[in-house]
Image (cartoon, rainbow, N blue to C red):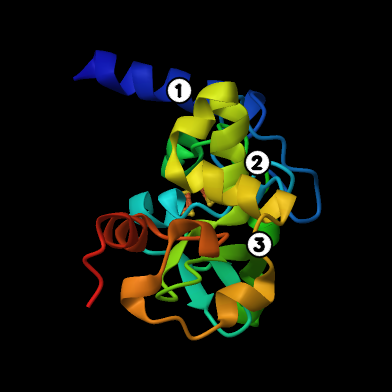
Amino acid sequence: MRYPKLRELKEAIISLISKPYTTKFPKGEFKPFPGYRGKPVVDEDNCVGCETCANVCPPGAITFEDDTNTGIRTITRNYGQCIFCGKCEEHCITGKGVKLSDEIFDLACFDRNEVIEKQERELLICENCGAIITTKDHIRFIHEKLGPKAYSSVLNLNMLNERLQLVRNEDAQLKIKDDLKRKDMFNILCPNCNRKIQCKILK
Ligand code: SF4
Ligand code: SF4
């Protein structure tokens, strides 16, 4: 019984003379350890709005809303729900779209809306059926990644059509009978309409 008491006494003396483990935040600066998982920070230049991070976020802190009228996808990141797990960073398709930072205590606030961030990305919408394909930045990213091989993909050809304006926008708006539709009448076609138009199986 004597030895445990001595050990406790030694611990108490060491604690008295050593620096505290706690910090004086917010009075003093908080220096996180390397690898500390703080607030995820989005890199606007490298986030393509692909939706992957929303699909892997365990508490659903990242959500997407697509508006076909404006052609805009709004990405909402609610750091009030974030558990700082790092899954968004780990699974980001560009590898640079979002990174966890050192910041965490600074997120404390009285109004939860203050920790909600929004981003907007332009959508790629099928000109025939109005289906949302993905974002334009997402397709551009795939295009750059694949190089010349990208032209083997219908979706990448869509982007090229649009850039070269091979089809006038007014033509795509015309009411064409389904059985008269041809692929070259549209700049942007979703894979489903592309297949139906090529095979003439539109009803
Ligand atoms: S996975 Fe990366 S590129 Fe895709 S929306 Fe999330 S942060 Fe942006
Ligand atoms: S760190 Fe985890 S909880 Fe927070 S936004 Fe990323 S995936 Fe979601």
Whether residue 153 is situated above or below residue 149 in the rendered picture? below
Q: Position of residue 191 (x, y in %)?
A: 35, 54
Q: The residue under label 3 is which amino acid type? A: Leu
Q: Residues within 10 Å of mark 3 (few under 14, many from 20)?
A: some
The nearer-to-camera label among 2 and 1 is 2
The image quadrant that residue 113 belongs to is bottom right
Q: In front of the other: label 1 or label 3?
A: 3
Q: Which mark is residue 81?
A: none
**Mark pair 3, 2: CA separation:** 12 Å
At which x and y percent is residue 194? 36, 57
Residue 65's place in the image compared with 21, above or below, is below
Type of amino acid at the residue the image marks with label 2? Ser
Return the x and y of residue 11 as percentages of the image width and height: 45, 22
Asked if residue 108 shows in the view, the reply is no
Task: Please give the residue where the numbered disc 3 appears in the rendered image.
Answer: 107
Which SS class for mark 3?
Answer: helix
Cα distance between the residues tagged 2 and 1: 35 Å
- Secondary element at image label 2: loop
* Depth check, front residue: 7 or 28: 28
Q: Which residue is mark 1?
A: 11
Q: At 34% across and 77% down in the image, what residue appears?
A: 178
Category of crowding for the residue at label 2, using alpha-carbon neighbours closer than 10 angstroms: few (below 14), some (14–19), many (at least 20): some
Quarter-wise, where is residue 180 in the image? Answer: bottom left
Sequence-wise, the earlier of marks 2 and 1 is: 1
Q: Quadrant of the N terminus?
A: top left
* Front position among marks 3 and 2: 2
Dots 3, 2 in contact, CB < 8 A: no
